[in-house]
Image (tube, rainbow, N blue to C red):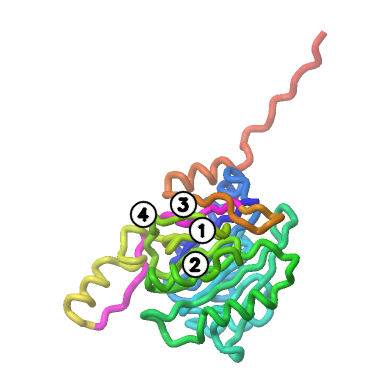
Amino acid sequence: MRILFIGDIVGKPGRKIVAQALPGLRQREQLDLIIANAENAADGSGITPKIYRELIAAGLDCITLGDHIYRRVEITSVLESETNIVKPANYPDEAPGRTWAVVEAANGVSVAVISVMGRVYMRPVDCPFKALDRVLAEIPADIKVRFVDIHAEATSDKQVIGRYLDGRVSAALGTHTHVPTADEQIFPGGTAFQCDVGMTGPYESILGRKIDRVTQATVTFRPTPFQVATEDRRICGAIVDVDSETGCATTIKRVMINEQEAIALQADCEPSSQAPVAQSPSG
């Protein structure tokens, strides 16, 4: 089976290119499941119920979240009621949301989805290793395909977590830093890994925000709102092929879809406006 994981969807530009390209990308790559980190989907920080529904309608099967999960308090109702969106597993039990989800892929295989936050240069959270041990023990043994979003700042943090999970999950892919890394690989135990799959949104930016705003705030220390940029929209992520019988990954490849490719993918999925010409019977 084939799983696409999309990295940090940033604001309206990120949501727009996802909606534009996803149906065609699913068809072209013969994808069975699409997961995305969407904690930056609402104007660069957080997610709302409306945006959650918009992204699911666009073709996402499951959504993972990270440290911006509660920036929009209205998302609480979705976190408490929907079964295809997860909070970081090492957040407190009292925090709204589920620590893992099971979604059915297009090929009928059940897939467990987990998000976990790192601790290096991040807000204080519970131990990710103990949280993962607990969650993996809770998931039914017959669910072989298991996916983990490692939402962390430091590459060392992500690598330790990834190695800790080797042979226990199908894929452990990183988010949060918004910059795709070139270290995609299959670990010896059959776990696909990449430190960061990258950002989905405007790349004529600084991590999705307008360059002049971030530069002014950094150079002058003047309080400056970091507005979401708009240009050079791209989808970044990774496609992982998984043996659904064993849960082991067999291949991983980076994905980067630019605006021109998104337009082409959209066109490929649109029904032809020209009706077929009726053929006269021969003879």
Q: Nearer the viewer, residue 80 or 275?
A: 80
Q: Which residue is mark 3?
A: 254
- Pick whichever of labels 3 and 2 is earlier in the sequence: 2
Q: Which residue is mark 1?
A: 187
For badge 2, the amino acid type reads Arg
- Pick whichever of labels 1 and 2 is earlier in the sequence: 2
Q: Which one is closest to the eye, mark 4 or mark 1?
A: 1
Q: Which residues are magenta?
A: 223-241
Quadrant of res 169: bottom right
Q: Residues within 10 Å of mark 3 (few under 14, many from 20)?
A: some
Q: Residues within 10 Å of mark 4 (few under 14, many from 20)?
A: some
Q: Which residue is mark 4?
A: 232
- Pick whichever of labels 3 and 1 is earlier in the sequence: 1
Q: Nearer the viewer, residue 263 or 274?
A: 263
Gap between marks 1 and 2, in whole Å?
8 Å
Q: For the point 50% across and 42% down, which residue is it?
A: 264
Q: Which residue is mark 2?
A: 163
Q: Quadrant of the C terminus?
A: top right
For badge 4, the amino acid type reads Asp
At mark 1, the secondary structure is loop
Q: Nearer the viewer, residue 215 or 148?
A: 148
Q: Residue furthest left?
A: 220
In the image, is residue 231 part of the stretch drawn in magenta?
yes
Gap between marks 3 and 2, in whole Å?
20 Å
Q: Which one is closest to the eye, mark 3 or mark 2?
A: 2
- Pick whichever of labels 4 and 1 is earlier in the sequence: 1
- Pick whichever of labels 2 and 4 is earlier in the sequence: 2
Q: For the point 54% across and 56% down, which residue is it?
A: 19
